[in-house]
């Protein structure tokens, strides 16, 4: 049986408002989540025991127990499989790499092991692995509420070009949430379907990422990256994703994103710069 594989796509918070905090310290969020076309690659195949092999440009940055192993165990503590992760996305970077890997693993192993779990059951298992796993399981643009566990469909999003930029400095989520100060924001969902990337950028410009200042305090290079994206030719919007440190620029289409990526690479040769497009839109 050949390995079955899927791309664990980068998750982007197109806007992210922190709207409150629960007694257990977790923050309540209102966020529009969408996916870039690029991501890590996860492949699974039958094997006599459970094995996880990791390669790819960011493999060396993964330390500790991988969320993929935890996802497999949460699905079935004893079932065997060989899982290969090709780590293409920077680690601890606000694009949900670990969560997206875990979600993709749950889907692939559910199929490999013939479990046939319903989406809601996979989402419950996913939430025990991380707050962003349910939205990654959902896999389409969505408004995320609660601590990440409440998912509502978003209007269709237009085709758009993206550039993802990361300083190659990890930005741990708990530290950023701890640093965040100031009043809580308000939910800011919209119902209209933007006609094109410029229309989407206009809607997003009226919203923000409430973790930006806290993330810059943790990793100052984020401020430079946001300024470089903003100044790049054709940029419609520059924003931090999640708790950082990855930022993204929105462009009219993929070819403008590719031009901007080259321009940004000139300004920050040490940065990870990846052109892509918004996935799962119309
Ligand atoms: O669950 P996840 O691993 O994504 O979150 C890491 C940490 O980020 C949590 O332990 C918590 O400190 C913080 N967090 C939060 N509110 C959220 C999500 C994460 O405070 N909604």
Image: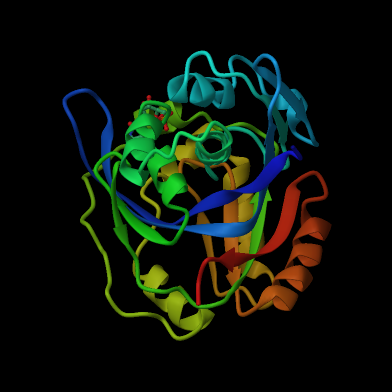
Q: Give percent across and percent down for residue 211.
A: 40, 44
The residue under the point 28% across, 58% down is 152
Position in image of residue 205 (x %, y %): 41, 70
Q: Quadrant of the N terminus?
A: top right
Residue located at (74% from left, 77% from top): 255
* Residue 132 visible in the picture: no
Q: Which quadrant of the frame does ligand 1 lie within? A: top left
User: Looking at the image, is 124 positioned above or below residue 62?
Assistant: below
Up-down relation of residue 97 to residue 130 (above or below): below
User: In the displayed structure, does residue 98 sit left or right of residue 60?
Assistant: left
Residue ID at (31%, 80%)? 192
Residue at 57% x, 27% y is 68
Task: Find residue 92 and report its image quarter.
Answer: top right
On the image, which quarter does residue 166 sit in?
top right
Position in image of residue 42 (x %, y %): 67, 39
Question: In the image as oriented, which residue stretches furthest toward the left?
Answer: 23
């Amino acid at each position: 049986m050949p390995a079955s594989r899927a791309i664990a796509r980068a998750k982007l918070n197109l806007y992210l408002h922190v709207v409150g905090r629960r007694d257990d310290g977790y923050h309540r969020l209102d966020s529009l989540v969408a996916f870039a076309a690029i991501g890590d690659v996860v492949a699974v195949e039958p094997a006599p025991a459970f094995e996880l092999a990791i390669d790819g440009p960011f493999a060396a940055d993964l330390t500790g127990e991988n969320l993929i192993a935890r996802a497999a165990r949460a699905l079935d503590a004893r079932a065997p499989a060989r899982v290969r992760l090709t780590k293409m996305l920077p680690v601890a970077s606000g694009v949900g790499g670990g969560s997206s890997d875990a979600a993709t693993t749950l889907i692939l192993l559910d199929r490999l092991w013939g479990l046939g779990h319903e989406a809601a059951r996979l989402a419950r298992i996913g939430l025990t692995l991380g707050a962003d796993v349910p939205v990654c399981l959902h896999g389409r643009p969505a408004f995320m509420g609660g601590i990440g566990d409440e998912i509502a469909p978003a209007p269709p999003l237009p085709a758009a070009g993206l550039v993802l930029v990361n300083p190659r400095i990890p930005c741990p989520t708990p530290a950023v949430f701890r640093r965040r100060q100031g009043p809580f924001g308000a939910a800011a969902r919209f119902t209209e379907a933007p006609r094109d990337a410029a229309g989407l950028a206009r809607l997003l410009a009226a919203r923000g990422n409430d973790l930006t200042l806290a993330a810059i305090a943790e990793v100052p290079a984020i401020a430079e990256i946001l300024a470089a994206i903003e100044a790049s030719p054709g940029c419609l919007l520059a924003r931090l994703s999640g708790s950082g440190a990855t930022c993204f620029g929105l462009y009219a289409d993929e070819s403008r994103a590719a031009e901007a990526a080259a321009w940004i690479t000139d300004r920050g040769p040490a940065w990870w710069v990846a052109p892509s497009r918004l996935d799962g839109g119309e």
